[in-house]
Structures are given as C-alpha cells and as structure tokens.
Amino acid sequence: MGFFWWGIFPYIVGTILVVASVYRFVFRGTSWHAPSTEIFEKKWLRIGSLLFHWGILLAFIGHVMGVLIPIEFYESIGVTDHLYHFGAIAGGGIAGLMVVIGLIILLIRKFSNPRVKVHASFADYFTVIWLIVVAGLGTYMTLVYNTTVVAYEYRVTIGPWFRSLFTLQPEYELMTGVPLLFQLHVLSSFILFAAIPFTQLIHMFSFPGRYPARAPQQYRARDGYKNSRP
C-alpha cells in the first residue's frame, strides 16, 4: 500500500489536476473565476479573506523552504536544526492560525448570511471545509506535535520524497516511517489538489497579465443622476 499512496497516487492527482484544468479552460473558460460575494456582505469577507490569503501565502513560502529546499542548503549557510525549527514553528504557527481563523470566519459567513448562503454551492462548502482540515492538521503538527512530542525532521523524509516525484523516481520508502499525522496532512493536501479544477480554487492559476492595459471600469452611483442635476 505504501507504494500506491506515495509512488502512484501523487501522479494520479497530478494527472487529474492538469487534464481537468485544461479541459475547464478550453471548454468552460467562462467558469474560470471565483465570483465575489462582497456585494452581499463586506465586513466579515474582508477580515476572513485577508487572513486566509496572507496566511496561505506565508504557508506556501514555508513549505517551499521546508520541502523543496534540501537540508544540506541550510547546513551550508550555517542554519542549525534548532534555529530552523524555531523559525518554522513560530512562522508556520502564525501562518497556520491565520489560515484556519480566516477560513472559519468565511465558513460561518456562508452559513449565517442568508444572501451569501443562497449563492454558495456544494463545491464552495467542500473547498472551505477541506481547507480547514488540511490547514488544521498542519497547524496542529506545527504548534502541538512539534512542541510537545518531537520536532519531527521532515526535511530528511517528506522533503526528499516530494522532490523525487519530479524526477519520476519516487522514493516512496521514505514515507513509510513518517508519523501518521504528517501522512494524513500530505494525503489530504493531494486530495485538495485533485479537487482544484472542480472548484473556485481554479482561480489561483489565473495571472492578471492584461490588467495594466485594461480600460478603466466606470461606476455610477444609484443616485448619481439626481445629484448631478443643477
């Protein structure tokens, strides 16, 4: 089973992600967006969205530093294991809490605001709830497991395994001894990746390249005509 989950499953997820995303872009291009519900409610959207997006950006940077950058690099520049894990726990903990709190705010907003709720689909709820699962596991591992059990050195197991996927020679045996919480975090993340083409998360692949040259949008107040009369 280890070979399937760590040697085959990631490629199944990657295939679904690429093929389904291309299909959606070619045949359902108009759905390649994340419609804003700001018109229905602004206050909690602004708080939750900002926390989530800034937190996920910090978490992404942290994952790059911990998974994609080999441990040998840190050793070569004099970063000790203690210093690295201290920074990872502090920075990762803050980022994880921002993501989880932001998502909880957005989920409560979807349930509690009737106008937002009526426009939310099953995919919207699944996205937020599953993101909470993924981020919640990651935050728990960072703030609780790494501080009360052991500061697990994922840079010698998960990191090399993940990088080996890009060489098409997955070192799946590295994942067999990884703590269960970390395995669940990785697998739940891959399930989320497979769901991206079928949810509004697809907008993460959009790049506003034409935005600087786009004609300005014109807005007119509801009582603009009345107030403009002499």
Image (spheres, grey):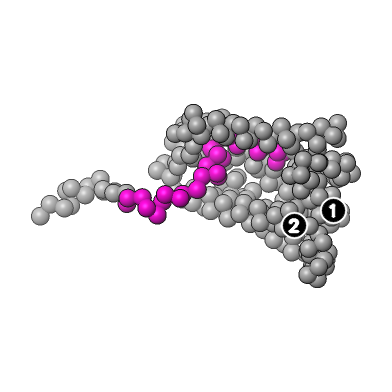
With 177 as the anchor, is 51 left or right in this view? left
Q: Is residue 93 above or below residue 117?
A: below
Q: Secondary structure at mark 2?
A: loop
Residue 190 rendering spot, x and y as whole percentages: 70, 38
The residue range painted magenta reads 188-216
Looking at the rendered image, the quarter that the N terminus falls into is top right
User: Mark 1 = which residue?
Assistant: 156
Name which residue lies at 78% across and 33% down.
8
Q: What secondary structure prevails in the magenta region?
A: helix
For disc 2, the marked residue is: 69
Task: Decide which of 229, 191 is in the foreground and name it.
Answer: 191
* Placement of the C terminus among the 4 image quadrants: bottom left
Which quadrant of the figure has residue 170?
A: top right
**SS of the residue under disc 1:** helix
Residue depicted at x 68% and y 46%: 135
* Residue 48 visible, this orientation: yes
Q: Is residue 44 left or right of residue 60?
A: left
Going from N to C along the chain, the mark reached first, 2 or 1, is: 2
Q: Nearer the viewer, residue 178 or 131?
A: 178
